[in-house]
Image (cartoon, helix red, strand yellow):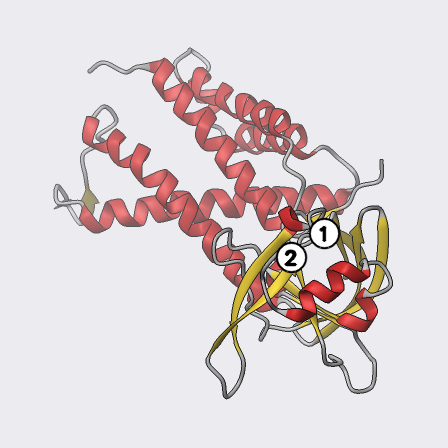
Amino acid sequence: MIVYVDVIWLLNVCFDALLLWLAALMLKRPVIWWRLLTGALIGSLLVVLLFTPFSAIAQHPLVKVAVSILIVLAAFGFKRPRYMIENMLAFYFATFAVGGGMLAVHYLFASQLSIQQGLLMMPPGAGDPVSWLFVVAGFPVLWLFSRHRVENIREKKLRFEHIIDVVVVWDGRPLALRGLIDSGNQLFDPVTKTPVMVVDREKAKEVLPEELMMYMAAMTFDDPPEQWAHRLRLIPYRAVGSGPQMMTAVKPDRIMLLYENEWLEVKQGLVALSADPLSADGEYNCIVHPKMVQAGRKLTAS
């Protein structure tokens, strides 16, 4: 049987990098690609050792744990013990979720199983091209499935009806807001799927020019202000008791959210204006799309 070590090594590097990426997404860690690839290369050393006289050492559980620690350190660095433990657990969870899913699917469709002396037996299939094709095709699918499930769980665990501090910046002018995270806000740009935040119009007057405010209030959608035309988007929505309607949203320079004592930056977000006060008692003046909290990246001190 021919074993292509270089192919196995390359697949291992790719898979380790994807698992580290999934762990970073789970913990909302910044993704630094050169660090992830360094961690993946360290993990691939075990594969190389399996084809040397040191294969027995490479398969020892303590060696595997030690290598996984090096992988996580290379990918995420070390800040404090808790940070390290969180990274380790996330990496193991991603590995077990994707790897366990592949084993489950493989056993589900396996047909060459037999029972010998009470033991379930199956052919090793290490060099079977069908097995490798299953790995190459199945790994990305299960990775995407795991990522989607993690995002869904995270979104459901967000404390909806939670009020947070929000800062929106246009042309270098920051607007400080109090935002309500509302699961009922499902406004998206239909083309780019960018989430939309709704801001009290009276509050937005503090930073937005009057020309733009008048255009967004008129709802004519014709002849937008030239300076702002490239930032404007039409957002469809449906109000209670009425048919489909359209509103204008504007793209800010930055959106920052203070959630659970950490500042998050929203890379993709739009802002629409509400003519009516959003809160009767003035407790908040914007409604934050839950996807913005979910997709926000932690700001790091520079």
Dot 2 corresponds to which residue? 270
Q: Residue at coordinates 24% horizontally, 47% vertically from top-left? A: 107
Above or below 109: residue 233: below
Dot 1 corresponds to which residue? 252
- Amino acid type at mark 1: Pro
Q: Position of residue 237 (x, y in %)?
A: 52, 72
Image check: 237 left or right of 251?
A: left
Q: Earlier in the sequence, mark 1 or mark 2?
A: 1
Image check: 53 left or right of 266?
A: left
Label 1 crowd (10 A; few <14 / some 14-19 / many >=20): some
Q: Position of residue 220 (x, y in %)?
A: 59, 66
Q: Position of residue 105 (x, y in %)?
A: 27, 48
Image check: 10 left or right of 85?
A: left
Q: Which of the 4 quarters of the picture holds residue 139?
A: top left
Above or below 123: residue 86: below
Q: Secondary structure at mark 1?
A: loop
Q: Residue at coordinates 76% horizontally, 72% vertically from top-left? A: 200
Image check: 91 left or right of 142?
A: right
- Amino acid type at mark 2: Leu
Residue 34, numbered circle: none
- Residue sticking out furthest to the top: 53
Q: Which of the 4 quarters of the picture holds residue 278?
A: bottom right
Label 2 crowd (10 A; few <14 / some 14-19 / many >=20): many
Between residue 288 and residue 132, name the one nearer to us.
288
Q: Residue at coordinates 45% horizontally, 28% vertically from top-left? A: 14
Q: Residue at coordinates 36% horizontally, 48% vertically from top-left? A: 101
